[in-house]
Amino acid sequence: MRLLTAPVHYILFLCVHATVPSPKAFAELICHTDHASECYTRIFQPTREFQTIHDDQNLPPGLHVRMNLATGVKEARLNVPQSGADEISSGLTVIEDPDTLGHGSARADDYTIDREDVPSQQPIRSPPYNLAENFVFSDSVSAVKSHNFADTDQLSAALNELEDLAHSYQWGLALAKDVDLSHRLYQLLLPSQPSEEIRSLTALVFGTAIRNNPEALSAALSHFYSDDWPEGLLEAIIVALLHEEAPALLSRMMYLLSSLCQDEGQLKRFLDARGIEILTRVYGVKSANADDMYRLKTKVSHFFVDHLRRPTSENVNEQEGFLKETELNAGWLAKTANME
Protein backbone atom coordinates (compact mmCIF):
# COMPACT_ATOMS: atom_id res chain seq x y z
CA MET A 1 0.00 0.00 0.00
CA ARG A 2 2.79 2.37 0.82
CA LEU A 3 4.24 1.91 -2.65
CA LEU A 4 1.06 3.33 -4.21
CA THR A 5 0.89 6.33 -1.95
CA ALA A 6 3.42 8.53 -3.72
CA PRO A 7 2.04 8.11 -7.24
CA VAL A 8 -1.51 8.61 -6.01
CA HIS A 9 -0.53 11.78 -4.21
CA TYR A 10 1.31 12.97 -7.31
CA ILE A 11 -1.69 12.32 -9.53
CA LEU A 12 -4.03 14.12 -7.12
CA PHE A 13 -1.63 17.09 -7.02
CA LEU A 14 -1.58 17.34 -10.80
CA CYS A 15 -5.38 17.19 -11.01
CA VAL A 16 -5.92 19.86 -8.39
CA HIS A 17 -3.18 22.11 -9.82
CA ALA A 18 -4.54 21.77 -13.34
CA THR A 19 -7.94 23.11 -12.31
CA VAL A 20 -6.64 26.19 -10.50
CA PRO A 21 -7.89 29.18 -12.54
CA SER A 22 -5.63 31.99 -13.75
CA PRO A 23 -5.57 35.26 -11.77
CA LYS A 24 -7.99 36.85 -14.30
CA ALA A 25 -10.63 34.28 -13.45
CA PHE A 26 -10.63 35.49 -9.84
CA ALA A 27 -11.62 39.01 -10.99
CA GLU A 28 -14.96 40.16 -9.62
CA LEU A 29 -17.71 39.97 -12.21
CA ILE A 30 -20.63 42.37 -12.70
CA CYS A 31 -23.82 40.76 -13.97
CA HIS A 32 -26.97 42.77 -14.62
CA THR A 33 -28.83 39.83 -16.21
CA ASP A 34 -28.99 36.05 -15.82
CA HIS A 35 -26.96 35.55 -18.99
CA ALA A 36 -23.34 34.75 -18.20
CA SER A 37 -22.26 36.07 -21.61
CA GLU A 38 -23.39 39.56 -20.59
CA CYS A 39 -21.23 39.69 -17.46
CA TYR A 40 -17.97 41.64 -17.36
CA THR A 41 -15.15 42.24 -14.90
CA ARG A 42 -15.33 45.09 -12.46
CA ILE A 43 -11.77 46.06 -13.41
CA PHE A 44 -11.47 46.67 -17.15
CA GLN A 45 -9.27 44.07 -18.87
CA PRO A 46 -7.50 45.88 -21.75
CA THR A 47 -6.22 44.33 -24.98
CA ARG A 48 -4.56 45.78 -28.05
CA GLU A 49 -8.00 46.46 -29.57
CA PHE A 50 -10.54 49.03 -28.39
CA GLN A 51 -13.29 47.64 -26.17
CA THR A 52 -16.37 49.28 -24.71
CA ILE A 53 -16.03 50.64 -21.17
CA HIS A 54 -19.08 50.03 -18.99
CA ASP A 55 -20.23 52.80 -16.69
CA ASP A 56 -19.61 50.79 -13.53
CA GLN A 57 -16.16 49.49 -14.51
CA ASN A 58 -12.92 50.72 -12.97
CA LEU A 59 -10.05 51.54 -15.31
CA PRO A 60 -6.42 50.78 -14.62
CA PRO A 61 -4.11 53.73 -15.35
CA GLY A 62 -2.15 54.23 -18.55
CA LEU A 63 -4.77 53.21 -21.11
CA HIS A 64 -5.63 54.82 -24.44
CA VAL A 65 -9.22 55.94 -23.85
CA ARG A 66 -11.45 57.48 -26.51
CA MET A 67 -15.05 58.48 -27.14
CA ASN A 68 -16.39 56.73 -30.22
CA LEU A 69 -18.48 59.38 -31.96
CA ALA A 70 -20.15 56.79 -34.18
CA THR A 71 -21.61 54.82 -31.24
CA GLY A 72 -21.51 57.41 -28.46
CA VAL A 73 -19.70 55.07 -26.04
CA LYS A 74 -16.31 55.28 -24.37
CA GLU A 75 -13.68 52.73 -25.38
CA ALA A 76 -10.19 51.81 -24.21
CA ARG A 77 -7.21 49.65 -25.17
CA LEU A 78 -3.59 49.21 -24.17
CA ASN A 79 -1.65 52.37 -24.83
CA VAL A 80 0.58 50.96 -27.54
CA PRO A 81 1.48 52.69 -30.82
CA GLN A 82 -0.43 51.43 -33.84
CA SER A 83 -0.24 52.54 -37.45
CA GLY A 84 -3.12 53.45 -39.70
CA ALA A 85 -5.56 56.31 -40.05
CA ASP A 86 -8.22 54.40 -38.11
CA GLU A 87 -6.46 55.27 -34.88
CA ILE A 88 -7.66 58.89 -35.04
CA SER A 89 -11.18 58.26 -36.23
CA SER A 90 -12.79 58.52 -32.82
CA GLY A 91 -12.69 62.30 -32.65
CA LEU A 92 -12.22 62.57 -28.87
CA THR A 93 -9.25 61.21 -26.92
CA VAL A 94 -9.58 60.99 -23.15
CA ILE A 95 -6.57 60.85 -20.83
CA GLU A 96 -7.71 59.42 -17.54
CA ASP A 97 -6.23 60.77 -14.32
CA PRO A 98 -5.52 57.95 -11.83
CA ASP A 99 -7.24 60.00 -9.11
CA THR A 100 -10.52 59.83 -11.00
CA LEU A 101 -10.52 56.13 -11.86
CA GLY A 102 -13.62 54.40 -10.60
CA HIS A 103 -15.08 57.69 -9.36
CA GLY A 104 -17.25 58.90 -12.22
CA SER A 105 -16.26 60.98 -15.20
CA ALA A 106 -12.83 62.48 -15.70
CA ARG A 107 -12.08 66.16 -15.16
CA ALA A 108 -12.65 68.62 -17.99
CA ASP A 109 -8.93 69.30 -18.36
CA ASP A 110 -8.26 65.59 -18.89
CA TYR A 111 -9.84 65.73 -22.35
CA THR A 112 -8.06 66.57 -25.56
CA ILE A 113 -9.63 66.83 -28.99
CA ASP A 114 -8.03 65.81 -32.27
CA ARG A 115 -8.48 69.00 -34.30
CA GLU A 116 -8.73 67.17 -37.62
CA ASP A 117 -11.81 65.33 -36.34
CA VAL A 118 -13.74 68.37 -35.11
CA PRO A 119 -16.93 68.58 -37.22
CA SER A 120 -16.52 72.31 -37.88
CA GLN A 121 -13.17 71.61 -39.54
CA GLN A 122 -14.72 69.30 -42.10
CA PRO A 123 -15.81 70.68 -45.50
CA ILE A 124 -19.48 71.61 -45.76
CA ARG A 125 -21.35 68.87 -47.54
CA SER A 126 -23.99 69.55 -50.13
CA PRO A 127 -27.53 68.50 -49.23
CA PRO A 128 -28.33 64.93 -50.25
CA TYR A 129 -29.58 64.68 -53.82
CA ASN A 130 -33.36 64.43 -53.94
CA LEU A 131 -34.52 62.95 -57.23
CA ALA A 132 -38.18 63.82 -56.66
CA GLU A 133 -37.39 67.48 -55.93
CA ASN A 134 -35.17 67.62 -58.99
CA PHE A 135 -38.05 66.46 -61.21
CA VAL A 136 -40.43 68.99 -59.64
CA PHE A 137 -37.92 71.82 -60.05
CA SER A 138 -37.14 70.95 -63.68
CA ASP A 139 -40.79 70.59 -64.66
CA SER A 140 -41.76 73.83 -62.91
CA VAL A 141 -38.93 75.81 -64.50
CA SER A 142 -39.88 74.48 -67.94
CA ALA A 143 -43.51 75.42 -67.36
CA VAL A 144 -42.60 78.99 -66.37
CA LYS A 145 -40.22 79.47 -69.31
CA SER A 146 -42.66 78.12 -71.89
CA HIS A 147 -45.80 79.77 -70.52
CA ASN A 148 -47.96 81.61 -73.07
CA PHE A 149 -50.29 83.60 -70.79
CA ALA A 150 -53.26 81.52 -71.93
CA ASP A 151 -53.10 78.93 -69.17
CA THR A 152 -52.61 80.84 -65.93
CA ASP A 153 -53.59 77.79 -63.86
CA GLN A 154 -50.57 75.84 -65.10
CA LEU A 155 -48.29 78.82 -64.50
CA SER A 156 -49.74 79.38 -61.04
CA ALA A 157 -49.15 75.74 -60.13
CA ALA A 158 -45.54 75.90 -61.35
CA LEU A 159 -44.85 79.10 -59.39
CA ASN A 160 -46.29 77.56 -56.24
CA GLU A 161 -43.98 74.56 -56.64
CA LEU A 162 -40.97 76.83 -57.13
CA GLU A 163 -41.88 78.93 -54.09
CA ASP A 164 -42.03 75.79 -51.96
CA LEU A 165 -38.59 74.68 -53.17
CA ALA A 166 -37.06 78.17 -52.98
CA HIS A 167 -37.05 78.02 -49.17
CA SER A 168 -34.15 75.58 -49.54
CA TYR A 169 -30.76 77.28 -49.93
CA GLN A 170 -29.88 74.79 -52.66
CA TRP A 171 -32.98 75.34 -54.82
CA GLY A 172 -33.07 79.08 -54.17
CA LEU A 173 -29.56 79.31 -55.56
CA ALA A 174 -30.40 77.06 -58.52
CA LEU A 175 -33.38 79.27 -59.35
CA ALA A 176 -31.38 82.50 -59.16
CA LYS A 177 -28.52 81.12 -61.26
CA ASP A 178 -30.82 80.32 -64.18
CA VAL A 179 -30.48 83.35 -66.47
CA ASP A 180 -33.50 82.62 -68.67
CA LEU A 181 -35.68 81.88 -65.66
CA SER A 182 -34.64 85.11 -63.92
CA HIS A 183 -35.47 87.14 -67.02
CA ARG A 184 -38.79 85.35 -67.36
CA LEU A 185 -39.72 86.09 -63.74
CA TYR A 186 -38.77 89.73 -64.28
CA GLN A 187 -41.25 89.88 -67.17
CA LEU A 188 -43.96 88.32 -65.01
CA LEU A 189 -43.56 91.16 -62.49
CA LEU A 190 -44.43 93.86 -65.03
CA PRO A 191 -47.90 95.43 -65.42
CA SER A 192 -48.11 93.83 -68.89
CA GLN A 193 -48.81 90.56 -67.09
CA PRO A 194 -52.60 90.62 -66.88
CA SER A 195 -52.96 88.43 -63.81
CA GLU A 196 -52.49 90.07 -60.41
CA GLU A 197 -52.18 86.62 -58.86
CA ILE A 198 -49.28 85.69 -61.16
CA ARG A 199 -47.42 88.92 -60.42
CA SER A 200 -47.94 88.38 -56.70
CA LEU A 201 -46.72 84.76 -56.85
CA THR A 202 -43.70 85.78 -58.92
CA ALA A 203 -42.67 88.36 -56.32
CA LEU A 204 -43.04 85.74 -53.61
CA VAL A 205 -40.96 83.17 -55.53
CA PHE A 206 -38.06 85.53 -56.26
CA GLY A 207 -38.19 87.11 -52.80
CA THR A 208 -38.03 83.68 -51.14
CA ALA A 209 -35.16 82.48 -53.34
CA ILE A 210 -32.83 85.40 -52.56
CA ARG A 211 -33.85 86.10 -48.96
CA ASN A 212 -31.03 85.29 -46.52
CA ASN A 213 -29.24 83.61 -49.43
CA PRO A 214 -26.31 85.87 -50.42
CA GLU A 215 -25.15 83.61 -53.24
CA ALA A 216 -28.61 83.58 -54.79
CA LEU A 217 -28.95 87.34 -54.44
CA SER A 218 -25.59 87.91 -56.11
CA ALA A 219 -26.46 85.47 -58.91
CA ALA A 220 -29.82 87.12 -59.56
CA LEU A 221 -28.33 90.62 -59.77
CA SER A 222 -25.68 89.42 -62.21
CA HIS A 223 -28.36 88.83 -64.85
CA PHE A 224 -29.41 92.49 -65.05
CA TYR A 225 -28.01 96.00 -65.57
CA SER A 226 -26.28 95.08 -68.81
CA ASP A 227 -26.67 96.18 -72.44
CA ASP A 228 -29.29 93.49 -73.01
CA TRP A 229 -31.08 94.09 -69.70
CA PRO A 230 -30.49 97.73 -68.64
CA GLU A 231 -32.99 97.46 -65.79
CA GLY A 232 -33.52 94.89 -63.09
CA LEU A 233 -35.96 93.58 -60.51
CA LEU A 234 -35.83 96.81 -58.53
CA GLU A 235 -37.22 98.86 -61.40
CA ALA A 236 -40.09 96.39 -61.87
CA ILE A 237 -40.89 96.67 -58.16
CA ILE A 238 -40.80 100.47 -58.22
CA VAL A 239 -43.29 100.53 -61.12
CA ALA A 240 -45.68 98.41 -59.08
CA LEU A 241 -45.24 100.42 -55.88
CA LEU A 242 -45.94 103.66 -57.73
CA HIS A 243 -49.06 102.58 -59.60
CA GLU A 244 -50.75 99.58 -57.99
CA GLU A 245 -53.58 99.91 -55.47
CA ALA A 246 -54.13 96.28 -54.41
CA PRO A 247 -52.67 95.83 -50.89
CA ALA A 248 -52.10 92.07 -51.36
CA LEU A 249 -49.96 92.62 -54.47
CA LEU A 250 -48.13 95.56 -52.90
CA SER A 251 -47.33 93.46 -49.81
CA ARG A 252 -45.66 90.84 -52.00
CA MET A 253 -43.74 93.56 -53.84
CA MET A 254 -42.55 94.96 -50.49
CA TYR A 255 -41.40 91.46 -49.53
CA LEU A 256 -39.35 91.19 -52.73
CA LEU A 257 -38.01 94.72 -52.22
CA SER A 258 -36.88 93.87 -48.70
CA SER A 259 -35.10 90.72 -49.94
CA LEU A 260 -33.46 92.65 -52.76
CA CYS A 261 -32.28 95.50 -50.51
CA GLN A 262 -30.15 93.13 -48.48
CA ASP A 263 -27.68 94.24 -51.14
CA GLU A 264 -26.38 97.69 -50.20
CA GLY A 265 -26.15 98.72 -53.85
CA GLN A 266 -29.83 97.94 -54.44
CA LEU A 267 -30.83 99.82 -51.29
CA LYS A 268 -28.91 102.90 -52.41
CA ARG A 269 -30.45 102.60 -55.86
CA PHE A 270 -33.91 102.50 -54.30
CA LEU A 271 -33.26 105.55 -52.11
CA ASP A 272 -31.83 107.46 -55.06
CA ALA A 273 -35.09 106.75 -56.92
CA ARG A 274 -36.96 108.71 -54.20
CA GLY A 275 -37.57 105.54 -52.25
CA ILE A 276 -38.78 107.33 -49.12
CA GLU A 277 -41.55 109.02 -51.10
CA ILE A 278 -42.48 105.68 -52.63
CA LEU A 279 -42.78 104.11 -49.18
CA THR A 280 -44.97 106.99 -48.03
CA ARG A 281 -47.25 106.47 -51.01
CA VAL A 282 -47.53 102.71 -50.40
CA TYR A 283 -48.17 103.19 -46.71
CA GLY A 284 -51.12 105.43 -47.49
CA VAL A 285 -52.90 103.00 -49.84
CA LYS A 286 -56.52 102.47 -48.79
CA SER A 287 -58.54 99.31 -49.11
CA ALA A 288 -61.90 97.92 -48.11
CA ASN A 289 -60.07 94.86 -46.82
CA ALA A 290 -58.76 95.97 -43.44
CA ASP A 291 -56.57 92.88 -42.98
CA ASP A 292 -54.79 93.38 -46.31
CA MET A 293 -54.27 97.07 -45.57
CA TYR A 294 -52.91 96.32 -42.11
CA ARG A 295 -50.54 93.72 -43.53
CA LEU A 296 -49.27 96.21 -46.11
CA LYS A 297 -48.60 98.84 -43.45
CA THR A 298 -46.73 96.17 -41.51
CA LYS A 299 -44.55 95.32 -44.50
CA VAL A 300 -43.63 98.99 -44.93
CA SER A 301 -42.91 99.25 -41.19
CA HIS A 302 -40.62 96.24 -41.26
CA PHE A 303 -38.79 97.54 -44.31
CA PHE A 304 -38.13 100.82 -42.52
CA VAL A 305 -36.86 99.03 -39.40
CA ASP A 306 -34.72 96.51 -41.31
CA HIS A 307 -33.12 98.88 -43.80
CA LEU A 308 -33.59 102.54 -42.83
CA ARG A 309 -33.69 102.77 -39.06
CA ARG A 310 -30.14 104.11 -38.86
CA PRO A 311 -30.31 107.50 -40.62
CA THR A 312 -27.55 108.61 -42.91
CA SER A 313 -26.56 112.19 -43.61
CA GLU A 314 -28.02 111.81 -47.10
CA ASN A 315 -31.59 110.88 -46.22
CA VAL A 316 -32.13 111.87 -42.58
CA ASN A 317 -34.49 114.72 -43.50
CA GLU A 318 -36.51 112.45 -45.80
CA GLN A 319 -36.81 109.84 -43.06
CA GLU A 320 -38.03 112.40 -40.55
CA GLY A 321 -40.65 113.55 -43.03
CA PHE A 322 -41.67 109.99 -43.67
CA LEU A 323 -42.15 109.35 -39.95
CA LYS A 324 -44.28 112.48 -39.60
CA GLU A 325 -46.53 111.56 -42.53
CA THR A 326 -47.08 107.99 -41.33
CA GLU A 327 -47.90 106.30 -38.06
CA LEU A 328 -44.43 104.83 -37.76
CA ASN A 329 -43.66 105.48 -34.14
CA ALA A 330 -42.45 103.27 -31.31
CA GLY A 331 -45.97 102.14 -30.43
CA TRP A 332 -46.83 101.14 -34.00
CA LEU A 333 -43.55 99.30 -34.50
CA ALA A 334 -44.07 97.35 -31.29
CA LYS A 335 -47.64 96.54 -32.33
CA THR A 336 -46.54 95.14 -35.68
CA ALA A 337 -43.34 93.43 -34.49
CA ASN A 338 -44.86 89.94 -34.64
CA MET A 339 -46.90 90.47 -37.76
CA GLU A 340 -45.66 88.85 -40.98
Image (cartoon, rainbow, N blue to C red):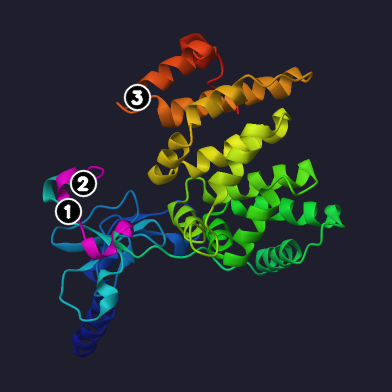
Question: What x and y, as percent, mark residue 305?
Answer: 45, 25
Residue 339 seen in this snapshot: no
Relative vertical location of residue 331 with respect to residue 288 in this rendering, above or below: above
Give the mark nearest the N terminus, 1 or 2: 1
1 or 3: mark nearer the eye: 3
Q: Secondary structure at mark 1?
A: loop
Q: Mark number for residue 106?
A: 2
Dot 1 and dot 2 residues touching (CB under 8 Å):
yes
Q: Dot 2, how many residues are within 10 Å of its Cα: few (below 14), some (14-19), or many (20+)?
A: some
Q: Secondary structure at mark 3?
A: loop
Q: Dot 1, how many residues are within 10 Å of its Cα: few (below 14), some (14-19), or many (20+)?
A: many
Relative vertical location of residue 245 with respect to residue 181 in this rendering, above or below: above
Residue flagged by tag 1: what amino acid is it? Glu
Instruction: State the residue position of label 3.
Output: 311
Instruction: State the residue position of label 1.
Output: 96
Residue flagged by tag 3: what amino acid is it? Pro
* Drawn side of residue 54 relative to residue 63, left or right: right
Q: Which residues are magenta?
A: 102-120
Of the pair 214 and 90, the residue shown nearer to us? 214
Q: CA distance from mark 1 to mark 3?
A: 58 Å
Give the mark nearest the N terminus, 1 or 3: 1
Check the picture and name the quadrant holding the C terminus.
Answer: top right
Residue 160 seen in this snapshot: yes
Of the pair 158 and 189, the residue shown nearer to us? 189
Q: Secondary structure at mark 2?
A: loop
Q: CA distance from mark 1 to mark 2?
A: 6 Å
Question: What x and y, as percent, mark residue 85?
Answer: 26, 77
